[in-house]
Amino acid sequence: MSPANMYQPMGYILDLGGKRVRPLLTLIACDLFNGTIQHALPSAMAVELFHNFSLIHDDILDKAPLRRANPTVHEKWNTDIAILSGDGMLVKAYDVLAQSQQQHIGYLLPLFSKTGMEVCEGQQMDMDFETQEKVSVEAYIQMITYKTAVLLGCSLQMGAICANTSYQTQQHVYEFGKHIGIAFQLLDDVLDVFAENENFGKQIGGDIIANKKTYLLLKALELANPAQLQQLQALCQMPNSLKDEKVKQVTALYLALNVKELALNEANKHTSIALQHLQEIEADEVKKDHLKAFALQLLNRNK
Amino acid sequence: MSPANMYQPMGYILDLGGKRVRPLLTLIACDLFNGTIQHALPSAMAVELFHNFSLIHDDILDKAPLRRANPTVHEKWNTDIAILSGDGMLVKAYDVLAQSQQQHIGYLLPLFSKTGMEVCEGQQMDMDFETQEKVSVEAYIQMITYKTAVLLGCSLQMGAICANTSYQTQQHVYEFGKHIGIAFQLLDDVLDVFAENENFGKQIGGDIIANKKTYLLLKALELANPAQLQQLQALCQMPNSLKDEKVKQVTALYLALNVKELALNEANKHTSIALQHLQEIEADEVKKDHLKAFALQLLNRNK
């Protein structure tokens, strides 16, 4: 497709793969409510395109050199091309969405755009946190909800819309996805520090080295006594040459302050809320069990 | 609105003003076909938001320091914020569009997205031209059609859709806007070199200094004899310190090769095509005359 400098990066990032969690959720939700799978295909494609658009642009903002072990678009081409092919991908997401059944578009479009705004807001909040001295745990949960979780809820709700489900049922499936997403991100924070095997695929303690304001760090700052607070602040300023020591000492502080447990509890709380919403849904119990199993599998990457 | 770093730049660029040509076209088209103006307001806002999104991102790509005599978003804030607030503005355009009447959304959305893809493609073509040695006049017309003209056609067609007009009539009003847009851009190329008064508001010869591949330059390269071609290529490599001399000599070559007249003829050709499409439209003749006068006024900025 032409111009190649716009379409090749779009094909490139899509070809890097990924688990395709979001489009799967859309199709699963459509099937859960006995919808016609074909009617949900435009929504499924749209959420995956939106997700990949956000990856291209987030990688620019994060100055990330690698995405799925390959050069990011702005590294392989340049930032201008990454901006424009990301824009094209976002428009393409809506272009594909427009191929939905006429009777669904009026419901899909407001949901997709509301979610899109929230994802942008979440990304901006995340950027703002970097320079903000004090970030509350509540603000952090709000940030991950917008940046990560709402797109999972949206993916499911779009499938439900394409199956002509009631608004109330749509809300339950949305909340299910959203709370699974919050739990997923909280567990991701824990795994970054406490992953026990090689399956995690990232550097252990990467967030600690980067002073990333995760649930663990924010909770530790909240709970630390004056001496611990001083120690934590000193550790955050440790030079990169001592990063192994930094990871070791921060991890020890996290354990002393019990923030790993608190993060797991918080994740479990959101998983429970998610499962309560699933329970409220009237649908084939076997299909519901499959969706539940799929979600729990996402959460249990390290076990 | 929060986060401020995302919403303030969006408000900032909208507050810089501009002629609001695109939303006006949407509302005029809706009125032309006796539609309810209120039904076209979401479309009018969506096209203006889309236009401003593209300005924010194009200014990054063009490294433009100023927009309407004020700092561009990436200069006033930074590139990361400009990327993200542009993204937010694009999503917001769709979010506003979703507030259209349910019966119109299925027609507005595919048109808006097709146009959005074309605008991105046009911007990429323009970037590609910078490093391309040979660019045909046809490719140039294609580029300005996508980058500038189709959004004018889209603005009008959206108004027509909101007035429940037939598809055939929509096509005529779209083509009217598209060809006015092509003529507008061709005249812009001419004005850059030959503007006769101070109303143009830009530096005379700016395109020549930047070696921008305009209709005039491409046509001159096409028509030049070997000696003129050599002269033109030498002029393109003249250092910036001699820019006044460069503008003077390139302008003289343009006059010798008659490319100003050719550009004006090409612009007139597209204006005529536009007016033929307007003639095909069945509507109140007084209203049609107002639309015609509005379009011709856009084209006659220098007279």
Image: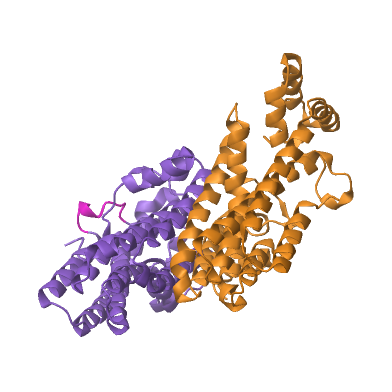
Chain colours: A orange, B purple
Picture coordinates of residue B229 (x, y %)?
A: 44, 72
- Please give left or right for residue A265 compared with residue B284 in the image: right
A239 part of magenta stretch? no
Front-most of B285 and B100?
B100
Residue A222 quadrant? top right
Q: Looking at this view, name the residue that lies furthest to the top.
A: A226
Overall secondary structure of the magenta section: loop
Residue A162 quadrant? bottom right
Q: Looking at this view, name the residue that lies furthest to the left.
A: B286
* Picture mark count: 0
Give above or below for B15 relative to B258.
above
Front-most of B208 and A93?
A93
Front-most of A68 and A254?
A254
Q: In which quadrant will I find the C terminus of chain B?
A: bottom left
Picture coordinates of residue B65 (x, y %)?
A: 42, 45
Give above or below for B178 relative to A225.
below
Give above or below for A167 relative to A203.
below
B201 part of magenta stretch? yes
Q: In which quadrant will I find the N terminus of chain B?
A: top left
Picture coordinates of residue A205 (x, y %)?
A: 80, 38
Q: Looking at this view, name the residue that lies furthest to the right.
A: A197
Residue A60 is at least partly visible in this image: no
Residue under the image location 50 percent in, 66 percent down: A94
Residue A28 is at least partly visible in this image: yes
Residue under the image location 39 percent in, 69 percent down: B105
Give above or below for B29 relative to B38.
below
- Please give left or right for residue B162 compared with residue B241 in the image: left
Picture coordinates of residue A299 (x, y %)?
A: 76, 52
- Please give left or right for residue A3 compared with residue B206 in the image: right
Span of residues in magenta: B196-204
Front-most of B3 and A301?
A301
